[in-house]
Amino acid sequence: MIGILSISFYGICSQSGGKDSLFEGRTCRLVLYNGYETEGIVEKRGEDTVLFRTDIITLKVPVKDIKFVLNPGFGLPETQDEYDSLSREIIPEVKIDTSDECDLYLDDRIVLYDVELLYLSDSTFEAFGGGMKKILLVSAVRKIVFKPVAPFGKGFLIGAGTGFLAGFLPFAFIEPHGETWGGPGVGLIFGLILAIPGGLIGGVVGVLTSSEDTYLFEKGFTAAKSKRLKFIIGKHRK
């Protein structure tokens, strides 16, 4: 199944008659790499982006983010045989600009826990996680809380690196003479010896000093609020 999901293609049951499957005026269903699906009309086809009008809003969708273009109501193939029976163009999979998991606080005391965010337009963004996905208005956001990601692991790496250098550098550039130890080999041994306790200390310090990144937003919509949300999602991008 994993191998099947890695196949990307355009023009399934195409209405285009050999033309670009995203030709202007086509009514179709888009499926993005992040799992988001919607039906609507291709309003404008640019070289890198598509203006896609749904019943609710008009989305500006990067072409590289589109995984499937389907006829309305057409279901995704579930078996390898179904995929093999369809004409397809294989395109490279790309990373989607989604954020790390966060807790999202909205108007009316609504809270969405452990969701990832995807910026869609100046006025909308998407939150998804746990089998749920919602298109939300920027104006509804009141607070976003990002929890620390692997604080022990990051602290361990920093501490281990510091410990290694503390053991390696004092000996690596000393010429051994008689009973005096020195040389890169000796430095490597002492560096490895100090790396382990240094890593453990760094991991504990990382956990104790880690803190949540909390962002508060004013009520309603402003252009500055939209730009700030876009920046925050990019800053915490996976």
Image (spheres, rainbow, N blue to C red):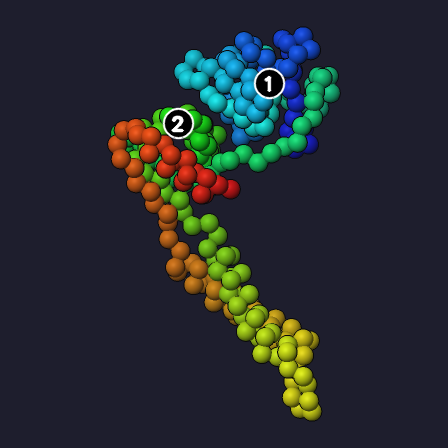
Q: Is residue 184 left or right of residue 116?
A: right
Residue at position x 33%, y 30% from top?
223
Please tell me which of labels 1 and 2 falls first in the chain. 1
Mark 2 neighbour density, 10 Å: few (under 14) some (14–19) many (20 or more): some
Q: Is residue 51 left or right of residue 179?
A: left
Name the residue nearer the viewer: 81 or 36: 36
What amino acid is found at the position of numbered circle 2 in the picture? Asp
Q: Quadrant of residue 186?
A: bottom right
Name the residue nearer the viewer: 40 or 3: 40
Res. 75 in view:
no
Q: Secondary structure at mark 1?
A: strand
Mark 1 neighbour density, 10 Å: few (under 14) some (14–19) many (20 or more): many
Examine the rendered structure and indicate whether residue 105 appears above or below residue 55. below
Q: Quadrant of residue 169?
A: bottom right
Examine the rendered structure and indicate whether residue 180 appears above or below residue 6. below
Residue at position x 65%, y 85% from top?
181
Q: Quadrant of the N terminus?
A: top right
Mark 2 lies on residue: 122
Q: Position of residue 77 (x, y in %)?
A: 64, 20
Res. 202 in view:
yes
What amino acid is found at the position of numbered circle 1 in the picture? Val
Residue at position x 68%, y 32% from top?
3
Q: Position of residue 121 (x, y in %)?
A: 42, 26
User: How far, Cα to Cα, is label 1 from label 2?
Assistant: 24 Å
The disc placed on residue 69 is 1
